[in-house]
């Protein structure tokens, strides 16, 4: 079979039909269509035809001609828009009416935004037609795509002088108009700001907004708020100043959020802080009749909270607030001392000489003055507690429980408490008053709350050992006189003190309760002893009191060998059965009052004794004699009659037994003025005893430290002793040095050869 050889057919090139490609002709048609697109007259145009025109030009290596030609057409259109739409509506700036200027700015900004919208719309359409050019030519030539080129052309032909300056001026006019309290149309402003944010310069590293508008806006804001801060300070009180400043912050935040760039917010807030707050912190907070003091006095917590919120915005705000709070507490502390203790001029038990109407000199008892001074001492503590409560309420509700503010408050109140040298005594008196029996109008829960607050003030005391001395005396009187509200309350108070100061602080105080228990057991045993040995007659004579004391001494010493019994008549009390005309009544009186009553035993019913006779017969100190005579003759139960009648005890007074006294009760407790402010002499004695105790405590602390360390330098020893004793009192370094010298003399310590350190001598 013959096979024919297949010959591969030859493919001929396609025949060219139609006219040859003309770049000039194609561009002419395309340019005409682009102009129609820019005039918004593209309804009759074919997208496919225009795309083919651009495609062919790029395909035939005429991409540069196409690219440059389109740029020229866009630039031409932008110049035309500027001349027709923007320049004719330039704000004139010739009218002083702010409303008119705002309207002109609004029209101008709207025109600019319309031109931008027109341009960007055209560039989107051109970008679709020239998509092949953007994909091929621009990448090859490394030039921007047509839409980016359009932004550059808009920046060059629209954002140029004088349009550039008018844009910034118009936006700033609108901002100023709104800051002055008027309303504006924010949409045109936001539209133009968005335009400036969309345009980039310096190879995209910065926007036109950042280059042109933001610096001008911040400069304008700085000038405005510098004047505004001074104006507000001159025309507003402190609360109104704070309200307006806070409103300014809120308004500027709203402004940057709605039509300015968020990047401007931090710089703008700093301008507000510098010009509305930092410059005027001290002036605002110290404004008379409206500053911090006035807000606290009127419990204006809302404005105080606003003050705190604003002040913590700036670095110096919190320190200014803390300093002002300290000054406020100090001023109020001085006022408390002046009002509460201003009448204090002498000792409680001093004797005042004055002339009566007849020119006769007389000596007037100051027992009433003692009561008044006690009330003033209690008032001082109560005022400090009230002041503390007020500031704590402000701190909790207005200052957000700021720990730094709390520290400043504690420092201020510590200085306030320490500024009154009698504060340890007054705080002890206050506790004493609240732990007594028979307080009217206070429940146990209320007393507990008051004592808790008192402990807060106690924390501020530097000389806690002085307080311990007074508290020990007052506690002893409460226990001995049976005036304590309850053992639970007393032990609860000791528990609070133990938490604050440790076991050593309350060890002796807790021992008092043990002593009272032993005393009660001893008295019960003594009564049993008397019942089994002899019958005791009523204590109506001083000689019988002596016999009774001797009898008890013998009984007590027979039970406890090696002890010494000391009688303290100022702390004792006794039960005495007194016969009046109507009935017999058993009186519970102090030992001094018993001695006074016994002076009237055996006298005729109308017999009188003078003050001086009682003083000589009893040998009682005049201060105690006056207090007890006042309790017997001038108080609720008048066991004695005073001649002439009155509330004060004078040295020329006379006294007689009140046989006509009647009462429905069979047993009556005659109280005395028990708690009182110490006299000057008593305070000096107390101070001497405290100094002696401090010397012993300091020496014990030094020995304890050196026994543990064996060797220490002088400065380290001083610092360690100060640290360990700080819980009780603040020791003076000079006194510590004296105690060290004393211990060296007694060979507890020895000084090293370098003269700067010590060794412990075992």
Image (spheres, helix red, strand yellow):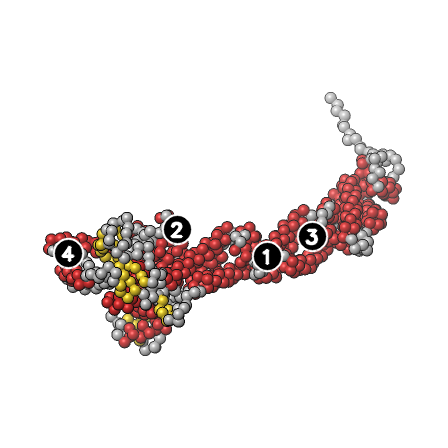
N-terminal label among 1 and 4: 1
CB atoms at circles 4 and 3 under 8 Å apart? no
Viewer-proximal residue among 629 and 755: 629
Q: Considering only vertical position in the picture, is 158 above or below 718?
A: above
Who's the residue at 61% across and 57% down the image?
237
CA distance for labels 2 and 4:
47 Å
- Give whichever of discs 2 and 1 has the lower sequence position: 1
Residue 106 or residue 382, whichever sits in front: 382
What element does badge 3 sit on? helix
Q: Position of residue 228 (x, y in %)?
A: 67, 58
Pick the front one: 451 or 761: 451
Disc sitting over residue 238 in the figure: 1
Tag 4, which secondary structure?
loop
Q: Which mark is residue 536?
A: 4
Q: Are marks 2 and 1 in contact (CB under 8 Å)?
A: no
Percent coordinates x, y for residue 173 in the rendering: 74, 53
| Label 3 or label 1, whichever comes before in sequence order | 3
Q: CA distance from mark 2 to mark 3?
A: 52 Å
- Crowding around mark 1 (Cα neighbors within 10 Å: few <14, some 14 to 19, many 20+) is many
Could you tell me which secondary element the residue under label 2 belongs to? helix
Mark 3 vs mark 1: in front: 1
Task: Say few, some or many: other residues with alpha carbon within 10 Å of mark 4 (under 14 / 14 to 19 / 20 or more).
Answer: few
Name the residue rendered at 26%, 63% in the picture: 608
Dot 3 corresponds to which residue? 179
Quadrant where the C terminus sits is: bottom left
Label 2 belongs to which residue?
449
Q: Is residue 755 visible?
A: yes
């Amino acid at each position: 079979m013959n096979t024919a050889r297949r010959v591969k057919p030859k493919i001929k090139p396609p025949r060219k039909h139609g006219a040859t490609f003309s770049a000039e002709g194609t561009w002419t048609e395309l340019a005409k269509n682009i102009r129609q697109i820019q005039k918004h007259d593209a309804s009759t145009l074919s997208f496919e035809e225009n795309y083919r025109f651009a495609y062919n030009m790029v395909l035939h290596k005429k991409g540069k001609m196409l690219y440059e030609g389109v740029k020229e057409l866009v630039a031409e259109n932008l110049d035309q828009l500027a001349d027709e739409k923007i320049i004719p509506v330039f704000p004139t700036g010739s009218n002083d009416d702010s409303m008119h200027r705002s309207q002109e700015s609004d029209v101008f900004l709207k025109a600019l935004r319309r031109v931008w919208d027109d341009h960007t719309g055209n560039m989107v359409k051109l970008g679709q037609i020239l998509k092949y050019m953007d994909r091929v030519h621009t990448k090859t030539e490394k030039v921007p795509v047509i839409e980016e080129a359009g932004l550059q052309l808009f920046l060059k032909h629209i954002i140029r002088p004088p349009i550039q300056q008018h844009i910034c001026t118009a936006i700033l006019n609108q901002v100023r108009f709104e800051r002055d309290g008027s309303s504006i149309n924010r949409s045109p402003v936001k539209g133009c700001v968005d335009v400036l944010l969309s345009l980039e310069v310096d190879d995209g590293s910065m926007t036109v907004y950042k280059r042109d508008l933001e610096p001008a806006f911040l400069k304008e804001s700085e000038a405005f708020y510098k004047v505004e801060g001074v104006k507000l300070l001159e025309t507003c009180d402190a609360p109104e100043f704070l309200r307006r400043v806070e409103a300014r912050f809120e308004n500027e935040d709203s402004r940057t959020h709605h039509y300015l760039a968020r990047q401007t917010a931090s710089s703008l807030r700093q301008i507000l802080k510098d010009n509305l707050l930092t410059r005027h912190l001290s002036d605002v907070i110290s404004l008379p009749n409206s500053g911090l003091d006035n807000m606290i006095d009127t419990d204006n917590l809302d404005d105080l909270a606003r003050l705190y919120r604003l002040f913590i915005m700036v670095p110096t705000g919190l320190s200014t607030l803390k300093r002002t709070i300290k000054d406020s507490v100090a001023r109020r502390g001085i006022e408390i001392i002046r009002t509460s203790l201003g009448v204090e001029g002498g000792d409680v038990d001093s004797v005042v000489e004055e002339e009566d109407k007849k020119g006769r000199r007389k000596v007037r008892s100051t027992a009433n003055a003692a009561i008044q001074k006690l009330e003033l001492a209690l008032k001082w503590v109560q005022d400090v507690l009230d002041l503390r409560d007020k500031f704590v309420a402000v701190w909790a509700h207005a200052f957000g429980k700021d720990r730094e503010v709390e520290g400043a408050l504690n420092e201020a109140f510590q200085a306030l408490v320490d500024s009154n040298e009698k504060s340890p005594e007054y705080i002890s008196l206050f506790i004493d008053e609240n732990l007594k029996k028979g307080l009217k109008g206070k429940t146990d829960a209320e007393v507990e709350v008051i004592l808790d607050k008192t402990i807060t003030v106690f924390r501020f005391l530097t000389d806690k050992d002085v307080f311990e001395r007074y508290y020990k005396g007052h506690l002893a009187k409460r226990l001995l006189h049976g005036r304590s509200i309850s053992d639970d309350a007393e032990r609860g108070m000791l528990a609070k003190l133990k938490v604050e100061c440790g076991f050593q602080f309350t060890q002796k105080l807790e021992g008092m309760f043990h002593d009272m228990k032993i005393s009660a057991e001893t008295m019960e045993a003594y009564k049993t002893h008397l019942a089994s040995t002899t019958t005791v007659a009523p204590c109506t004579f001083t000689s019988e009191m002596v016999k009774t004391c001797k009898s008890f001494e013998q009984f007590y010493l027979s039970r406890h060998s090696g002890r010494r019994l000391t009688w303290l008549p100022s702390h004792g009390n006794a039960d005495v059965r007194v016969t009046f005309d109507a009935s017999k009544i058993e009186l519970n009186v102090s030992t001094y009052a018993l001695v006074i009553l016994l002076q009237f035993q055996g006298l005729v019913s109308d017999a009188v004794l003078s003050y001086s006779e009682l003083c000589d017969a009893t040998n009682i100190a005049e201060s105690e004699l006056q207090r007890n005579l006042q309790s017997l003759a001038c108080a609720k139960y008048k066991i004695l009659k005073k001649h002439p009648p009155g509330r004060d005890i004078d040295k020329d007074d006379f006294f007689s037994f009140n046989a006509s006294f009647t009462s429905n009760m069979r047993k009556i407790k005659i109280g005395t003025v028990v708690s009182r402010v110490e006299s000057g002499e008593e305070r000096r004695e107390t101070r001497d005893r405290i100094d002696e105790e401090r010397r012993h405590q300091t020496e014990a602390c030094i020995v304890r430290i050196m026994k543990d360390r064996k060797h220490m330098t002088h400065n380290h020893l001083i610092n360690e002793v100060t640290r360990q004793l700080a819980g009780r009192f603040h020791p003076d370094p000079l006194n510590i040095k004296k105690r060290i010298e004393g211990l060296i003399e007694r060979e507890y310590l020895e000084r090293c050869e370098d003269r700067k350190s010590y060794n412990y001598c075992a």
